[in-house]
Image (tube, grey):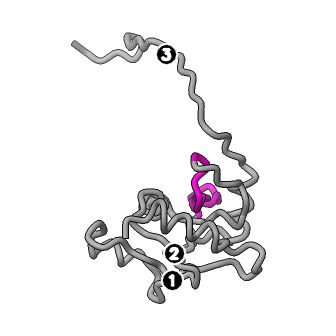
Amino acid sequence: MPFEIDSIDRRIVSQVLQRPFRDRAFSAAIKAAYHDTCAVMGLKLINGGGRSEVQAAHIRPLADRGPDSVRNGLALSGTVHWMFDRGLISVDDDYNLLIASGGVPDTVTRLINPERRLLVPSRPDERPHSQFLQYHREKVFKG
C-alpha cells in the first residue's frame, strides 16, 4: 500500500501540567553574563540561525525553591547541563569542577576545559553564589 500523507489521522490529546514557571529573563541574563559560552567546556555555541545553543541551568533547582537569579545560574551546553542536573558534576566554592567517581566515563572528562575550573563571569555580582554551590554539592552531587 503506498504511503499517503493525507491518510494519517492523529488524535489530539490535552494535557495539564503543573511545574514552576521558567522565566525567559533568567535565560537571557545567564547567556549574557557568560557571553553564550558553556562555563564547563569553554565553547561558544551558536547555531546556523545565529542563536545561542548554550542553556541556562539552575544551580539550586526551581523544584527545590531555587530562585531565578544570575547568582543561581550557569551557562551550560546541553550534555553538560544534563550531567549537572543529575549530579555527575558539581563545583566547589573556588569554582573547581568536581566529577562524581564511578558515574562518569573517562571520555566525558574530555568535554571539560583543561584547567578543570568553572569559567565565571568577570563581574563578581554575576558569579555563582557559594550558598547555591553548596546546596548542589550536598543535595544533588553524587560524588
Label 2 to label 1, Cα distance in Å?
6 Å
Q: Observer-nearest residue: 54 or 142?
A: 142
Which amino acid type corresponds to the residue marked 3 in the rendered image?
Val
Query: Where is residue 95 shown, x and y percent of the image?
Result: 56, 81
Tag 1's secondary structure?
A: loop
Residue sitting farthest toward the left:
1
Crowd rating for badge 3 (residues with CA inside 10 Å; few <14, some 14–19, many 20+): few
Which residue in the structure is indicated by mark 1?
96
Range covered by the magenta-colored residues: 46-63
Residue identifier under label 2: 91
**Residue 4 drawn at (x, y percent):** 35, 15
Q: Are marks 1 and 3 in contact (CB under 8 Å)?
A: no
Closer to us: mark 1 or mark 3?
Answer: 1
- Residue extending farthest bottom: 115
Residue closest to the far front: 138
Observer-nearest residue: 96 or 34?
96
Q: Quadrant of residue 38?
A: bottom right
First along the sequence among labels 1 and 3: 3
Question: Which mark is first along the chain, 1 or 2?
Answer: 2
Give the image location of residue 140, x and y in percent. Answer: 46, 60
Residue for point 57% across, 22% down: 16
Q: How many C-alpha atoms fall within 10 Å of the one at disc 2: few (<14), some, or many (≥20)?
A: many
Q: Secondary structure at mark 3?
A: loop
In the displayed structure, 122 sits above or below 76; it is below
- Disc 1 to disc 3, C-alpha distance: 46 Å
- The residue that mark 3 highlights is 13
The secondary structure that most of the magenta stretch takes on is: loop
**Residue drawn at point x = 64 percent, y = 63 percent:** 73
Q: Nearer the viewer, mark 2 or mark 3?
A: 2
Q: Are marks 2 and 1 in contact (CB under 8 Å)?
A: yes
Q: Amino acid at mark 1?
A: Asn
